[in-house]
Image: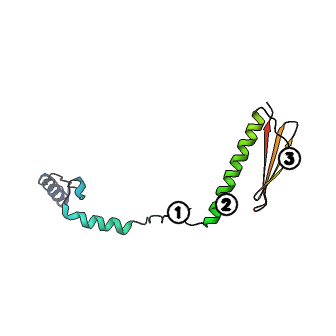
Amino acid sequence: MFKKGFISIVFLLFVAMTTVHAGELVWTPINPSFGGSSFNAQWLMNQAQQQNTFTAPTAPESRYFSRDPLQNFQESLNRQILSRLASQITRNVFGETPLEPGHFEIGTFSIDVTEGTDGIHITIFDSSTGGETNIVVPYF
């Protein structure tokens, strides 16, 4: 029927399973920030620094110092002239006196003001860059 070897193996397995004891599973954190040993702090910091591939971007030089002061002055003057021209056009269009068409030369800018059927056309041409801007101020 049953072989003697098979019965002895089953008996040994039964005895081995009954004598097995388990201990309590205890986990301790490694990082000292979360309760681990403070002796791990330097090792963890070294590992993090070795793995870090991020490099901080270098701060570009200030726009003011990286450009020529004469160029800054010219751009500032051009902005002031265009601002004053915009104020005058706005005052003439929306004020009591009508805007008179014409051609104006201001620095490197050529400004043409004409009246059209849909509004006042302002063409600004910058001779230093070759750029042209067209503005249409509609009638009300």
**Element type at mark 1:** loop
Indicate whether 49 appears above or below 85.
Answer: below
**Element type at mark 2:** helix
Q: For the residues marked 3 and 1, what is the alpha-carbon distance in whole angstroms?
A: 41 Å
Q: For the residues marked 3 and 2, what is the alpha-carbon distance in whole angstroms?
A: 25 Å
Image side of residue 113 versus residue 68, left or right: right
**Residue 131: image location, x then y, percent:** 77, 57
Mark 3 vs 1, N-terminal side: 1
**Amino acid under label 1?**
Ser
**Amino acid under label 2?**
Gln
* Depth order, front residue of 119/89: 89
**Camera-side mark, 2 or 1:** 2
Give the tally of numbered discs: 3
The disc placed on residue 74 is 2
**Residue 115: image location, x then y, percent:** 86, 40
**Element type at mark 3:** strand
**Residue 71: image location, x then y, percent:** 65, 64
The disc placed on residue 102 is 3
**Other-residue count near label 1 (Cα within 10 Å), few / some / many at <14 / 14–19 / ≥20:** few
**Other-residue count near label 2 (Cα within 10 Å), few / some / many at <14 / 14–19 / ≥20:** few
**Amino acid under label 3?**
Gly
Q: Which residue is mark 1?
A: 62
